[in-house]
Image (cartoon, rainbow, N blue to C red):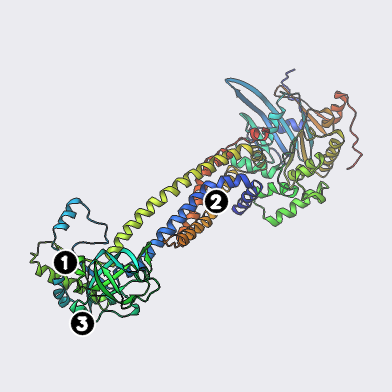
């Protein structure tokens, strides 16, 4: 019997027994549904990481000189972690040296942050993400003011008590007021608000608008960096091509400054968006593996259900098999008929599961900060998986059907 | 009564069977069996269903195979229909030695050379008459258009042109059996093999089906009918009676009707 014929026959069979077919393909359907949903969410997260997170949190063509990596997957051992803690800190005083080493056209900035309590007379005290920054911080971070202005070089240099605040901070501490020119108290010290940043949105539900940024030389750095050390020195080169060179120069001057011998390893770290994304890739792999384990179980169960139902179908249709054999159906014809039927059922389940999975992904995207991107390959994979599950679970029942003795089969009521 | 003499009706048949083992019979013979044996193992006990059956049937013959239950007639039907293989002896069908063919080859033989008509019709309940009749053509690899055409023609031959889209449960017993006959004929088989074709039908419908068979036989179709009803067997031109796994008698109809003491069927009535 030709393949197309067998598919039509299978579809006719499914149409006749709608309810039974539905329950048969439910397992595969649910398995595929979760598979699609999980892959979509993981994919969405990772494209989000690459496009938004990396750019927003780390900047393009940017590396950050740190004591140890922040966004990586941490120390591989307790020992390594302790060795990291023994490393010297990065100090604000390292800045001139780094600044001198980077190529022409590069920007640099220091960053140091701490969650500190802020208050105004219009709102209850609340923690803000306080940053004490220096250099071209705003340019590197692509921060722009929505109203007001950024620090002047004089304010930076003199450490004037001025602050540029995020959208959320402005709304919370200055409800229905223009925050410009009004004081925001951080750790009891008043800072005059000179600018409000444009809304930045959030990364994984963490708002980027809860910041209060003051010049490094302002009193704020006593709280963010009591020991004069900074979280990191950011360097942004003019183009991606010069970044490697810049990193190498910074490395050299830092090693020189710390008097490291050639055999000594670096006791600092230069974090790039690539190094953070490498970690994301790892995370993605783990999530994909963990996230597909559950759907895989669903598929196995779905396959077993199909096998079971197909065995029942073979028993129910023994006479039909006898008739077909008496009319000249060969073993392989019967085999194909039941295999195709199992595969069609299962593929149909997969198709429904794909639709439901896309729906779930969309709902997750809509209801949570997690984005979802439906990967075309996951749809192809899920369809193939559905078909393969059907074929595998159909083999045994189909073999039973094909090996029935026509005389016995015809005698069966 | 066991005799050395093979109870065949004519010398020609005797010769066809007696020819050397392995020698293909002449073209005129559609079926030749030589010493056909079939044993069943029933839980350690061997039952000899057929103990050596010699039959020779010409093309265009209309033959009934009779016998009491346990005589081996069902076994013989299964062997002739290539649903089963013998333990011994030879079976030649349409010039081919089918007794040593494998399963797939037997399926092909069933498809091309044999048209089955069963007591219980054995139609696919969910398929229309047309689709049922198309089924052998599906396995013969005939294209969809050609299938439809030939199936429609076959249904026309059994006067069911107006019922081709009906399902079996929308048809009467006689109509169902005629669908089954159309299905049996659609591949132009060498033999039409009917197993108690009227067993599930009332006497009027039985007569109707018998007239269909009569008509087919007249058109030159070889018909072999297995039955235990003498009235039905009397329609055939030749009756082979089995007893205890052997051919007990093999006669022309006239002899059979006389010995069975039944009225000859009225063959002048046409369907």
* Residue B200 visible in the displayed image: yes
Q: Where is residue A54 drawn, in percent x and y?
A: 32, 67
User: For the residues carrying marks 2 and 3, which lies nearer the camera in this image?
Assistant: 3
Q: Nearer the viewer, residue B154 or A187?
A: A187
Q: Which residue is mark 2?
A: A349
Please check whether the numbered discs 2 and 3 fall on a single chain: yes
Q: Where is residue B237 drawn, in percent x and y?
A: 83, 34
Q: Nearer the viewer, residue A87 or A131?
A: A131
Q: In this image, A386 relative to A22: left or right? A: left
The mark nearer the N terminus, 3 or 1, is 3
Q: Quadrant of the C terminus of chain A?
A: top right
The mark nearer the N terminus, 2 or 3, is 3
Q: Which residue is mark 1?
A: A229
**Image height check: is A147 above or below B115?**
below
Q: Which residue is mark 3?
A: A154
Q: Where is residue B144 drawn, in percent x and y?
A: 68, 55
**Image height check: is B19 above or below B70?**
below
x 45%, y 45%: residue: A297
């Amino acid at each position: 019997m030709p393949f197309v014929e067998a598919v039509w026959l299978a579809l006719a069979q499914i149409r006749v027994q709608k309810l039974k077919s539905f329950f048969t393909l439910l397992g595969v359907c649910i398995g595929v549904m979760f598979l699609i949903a999980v892959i979509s969410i993981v994919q969405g997260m990772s494209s989000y990481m690459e496009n938004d997170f990396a750019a927003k949190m780390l900047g393009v063509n940017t590396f950050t000189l740190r004591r140890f990596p922040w966004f990586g997957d941490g120390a591989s051992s307790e020992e390594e972690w302790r060795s990291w803690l023994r490393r010297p800190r990065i100090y604000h005083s390292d800045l001139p040296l780094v600044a001198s080493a980077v190529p022409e056209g590069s920007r640099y900035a220091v960053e140091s942050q701490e969650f500190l309590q802020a208050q105004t007379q219009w709102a209850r005290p609340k923690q803000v993400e306080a940053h004490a920054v220096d250099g071209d911080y705003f340019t590197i971070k692509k921060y722009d003011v929505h109203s007001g202005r950024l620090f002047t070089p004089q304010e930076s240099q003199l450490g004037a008590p001025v602050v540029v605040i995020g959208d959320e901070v402005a709304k919370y501490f200055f409800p229905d007021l223009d925050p410009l020119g009004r004081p925001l108290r951080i750790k009891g010290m008043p800072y005059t608000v000179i600018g409000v940043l444009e809304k930045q949105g959030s990364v994984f539900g963490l708002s980027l608008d809860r910041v209060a940024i003051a010049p490094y030389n302002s009193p704020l750095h006593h709280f963010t960096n009591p020991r004069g050390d900074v979280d990191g020195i950011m360097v942004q080169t003019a183009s991606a091509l010069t970044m490697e060179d810049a990193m190498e120069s910074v490395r050299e001057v830092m090693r020189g400054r710390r008097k490291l011998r050639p055999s000594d390893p670096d006791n600092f770290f230069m974090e790039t968006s690539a190094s953070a994304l490498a970690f994301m890739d790892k995370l993605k792999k783990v999530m994909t593996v963990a996230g597909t384990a559950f759907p895989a179980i669903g598929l196995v169960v779905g396959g077993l259900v199909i096998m079971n139902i197909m065995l029942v179908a073979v028993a129910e249709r023994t006479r039909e098999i006898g008739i077909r054999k008496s009319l000249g159906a060969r073993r392989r014809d019967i085999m194909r008929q039941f295999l195709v039927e199992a595969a069609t059922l299962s593929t149909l389940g997969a198709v429904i599961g794909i639709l439901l999975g896309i729906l779930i992904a969309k709902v997750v995207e809509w209801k949570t900060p997690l984005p979802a991107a439906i990967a075309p390959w996951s749809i192809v994979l899920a369809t193939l998986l559905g078909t393969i599950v059907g074929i595998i679970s159909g083999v045994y029942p189909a073999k039973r059907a094909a090996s029935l003795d026509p005389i016995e089969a015809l005698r069966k009521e | 009564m066991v005799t050395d003499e093979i109870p065949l009706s004519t010398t020609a048949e005797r010769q066809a069977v007696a020819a050397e083992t392995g020698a293909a019979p002449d073209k005129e013979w559609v079926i030749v069996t030589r010493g056909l044996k079939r044993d069943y193992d029933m839980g350690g006990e061997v039952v000899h269903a057929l103990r050596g059956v010699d039959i020779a049937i010409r093309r265009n013959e209309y033959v009934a195979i009779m016998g009491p239950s346990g005589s081996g007639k069902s076994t013989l039907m299964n062997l002739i229909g290539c649903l089963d293989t013998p333990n011994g002896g030879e079976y030649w069908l349409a010039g081919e030695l089918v007794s040593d063919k494998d399963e797939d080859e037997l399926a092909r033989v069933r498809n091309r050379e044999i048209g089955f008509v069963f007591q219980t019709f054995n139609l696919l309940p969910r398929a229309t008459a047309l689709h049922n009749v198309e089924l052998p053509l599906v396995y013969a690899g005939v294209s969809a258009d050609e299938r439809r055409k030939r199936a429609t023609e076959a249904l026309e031959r059994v006067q069911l042109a107006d019922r081709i889209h009906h399902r079996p449960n929308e048809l009467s017993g006689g109509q169902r059996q005629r669908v089954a006959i159309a299905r049996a004929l659609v591949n132009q088989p060498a033999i039409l093999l009917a197993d108690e074709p009227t067993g599930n039908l009332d006497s009027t419908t039985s007569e109707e089906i018998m007239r269909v068979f009569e008509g087919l036989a007249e058109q030159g179709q070889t018909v072999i009918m297995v039955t235990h009803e003498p009235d039905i067997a009397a329609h055939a031109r030749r009756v082979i009676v089995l007893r205890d796994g052997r051919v007990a008698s093999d006669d022309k109809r006239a002899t059979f009707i006389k010995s069975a003491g039944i009225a000859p069927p009225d063959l002048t009535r046409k369907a």
